[in-house]
């Protein structure tokens, strides 16, 4: 839901009274958790400092600088469907208007189905979002003292020098990422992880802070319509597509632990575009797909399996049971693979077993 997107993009939160949750505001840069969000499915939000307010569709349009349709697509990755709440009269609520008149028209068109004429179906060549300023390669700065804390952090997470080289891990001590709305977001002591296409060209990136209590834990690259986004990229698929198994995990460090069979979809929500990409790139070998999400992502795992079978009904799919909610990076290679090798088939019987395990 919308809260999942906020936690992914804004980082840590604090509870508030009245069914609300607080974040730091991405629009005015306030660091005192003045950005209030209604925890109900409607997801109304308001910053008590700068006064910006609205609902999820307005938030995504403003944060990423995208149009209505693109914002709607992003929200649907998080299982927030704009049309589910559009019928309610929220124009006079404390969060401000829900949709503008133009957005209402666009929603009507979207609900009727998009009609694309053949001559209009021009594919745009996507590019990689611009990396943060002051982004440096760890390998090229191996003997630079400023790189030592990043190397130490990676070593503590089980990342080898060979893996640093293969993935061209970079770092930012003090840099800026420009959001799609033109505003700047400061990054202090962040690692930068790149995703590559099948030719080894960087197409997307995300970050992870090495600070114990960071203002921003991680950042997925803000993407313009002409750039690759988290909903269209699958990290490490350029290597995993040659393997006999594909393991879908949530983050970089879980991928590193499992090895080149693992791919990252940037969180629990897996888009149809990402699934189609995985299936297309592995069409020749038809490797089984293992869905290895955190324990609280078990319902999302069922949705992912369903989406896979909607595209390819013959592809073998499995659920990896995470009984103690310890992710692969915590477990280590041997135990992580033990769980993968004892996965549950994502068929009718397997889904019943899967649901039962998580409802016990």
Image (cartoon, helix red, strand yellow):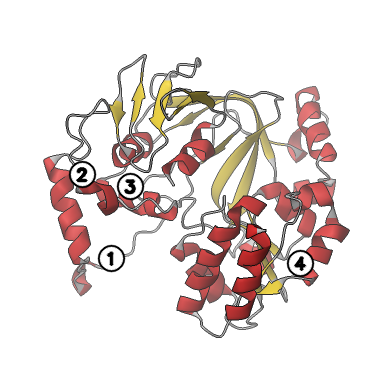
Looking at the image, which residue sits at the far front? 360
Judge left or right: residue 116 versus residue 209: left
> What percent of the width, then of the height, locates residue 241?
65, 71
Disc 1 element: loop
At a point 27% along the width and 47% down the height, the residue shown is 85
Q: CA distance from mark 1 to mark 4?
A: 41 Å
Judge left or right: residue 127 versus residue 65: right
First in sequence: mark 1 or mark 4? Answer: 1
Q: CA distance from mark 4 to mark 3?
A: 35 Å
Q: Which residue is mark 2?
A: 88
Tell which tag, 2 or 4, sits nearer the viewer.
2
Disc 4 element: helix
Q: Which residue is mark 3?
A: 71
Tell which tag, 1 or 2, sits nearer the viewer.
2
Residue 280 visible in the snapshot = yes
First in sequence: mark 1 or mark 2? Answer: 2
First in sequence: mark 4 or mark 3? Answer: 3
First in sequence: mark 3 or mark 1? Answer: 3
């Amino acid at each position: 839901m919308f809260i999942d997107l906020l936690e992914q993009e804004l980082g840590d939160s604090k509870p508030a009274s009245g069914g609300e949750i607080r974040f730091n505001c991405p629009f005015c840069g306030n660091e005192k958790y003045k950005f209030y969000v209604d925890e109900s499915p409607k997801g109304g939000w308001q910053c008590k400092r700068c006064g910006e307010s609205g609902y999820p569709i307005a938030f995504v349009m403003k944060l990423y600088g995208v149009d209505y349709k693109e914002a709607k697509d992003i929200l649907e990755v998080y299982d927030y469907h704009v049309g589910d709440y559009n019928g309610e009269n929220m124009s006079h609520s404390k969060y401000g208007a829900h949709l503008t008149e133009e957005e209402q028209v666009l929603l009507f068109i979207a609900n009727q189905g998009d009609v694309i004429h053949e001559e209009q179906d021009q594919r745009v060549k996507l590019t990689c979002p611009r990396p943060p300023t002051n982004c440096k390669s760890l390998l090229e700065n191996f003997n630079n003292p400023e790189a030592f804390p990043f190397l130490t952090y990676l070593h503590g997470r089980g990342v080898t020098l060979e893996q640093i080289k293969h993935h061209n891990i970079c770092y930012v001590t003090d840099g800026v990422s420009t959001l799609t709305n033109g505003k700047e977001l400061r990054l202090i002591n962040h690692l930068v992880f790149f995703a590559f296409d099948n030719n080894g060209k960087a197409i997307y990136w995300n970050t992870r802070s090495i600070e114990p209590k960071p203002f921003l834990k991680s950042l997925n690259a803000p993407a313009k319509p002409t750039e690759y986004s988290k909903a269209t990229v699958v990290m490490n698929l350029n290597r995993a597509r040659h393997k006999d198994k594909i393991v879908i995990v949530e983050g970089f460090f879980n991928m590193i632990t499992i090895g080149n069979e693992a791919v990252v979809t940037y969180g629990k929500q897996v888009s149809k575009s990402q699934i189609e990409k995985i299936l297309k790139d592995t069409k020749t070998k038809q490797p089984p797909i293992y869905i290895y999400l955190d324990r609280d992502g078990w319902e999302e795992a069922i949705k992912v399996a369903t989406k896979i079978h909607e595209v390819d009904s013959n592809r073998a799919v499995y659920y990896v049971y995470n009984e103690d909610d310890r992710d692969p990076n915590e477990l280590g290679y041997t135990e992580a693979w033990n769980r993968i090798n004892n996965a549950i088939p994502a068929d009718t019987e397997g889904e019943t077993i899967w649901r039962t395990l998580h409802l016990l």
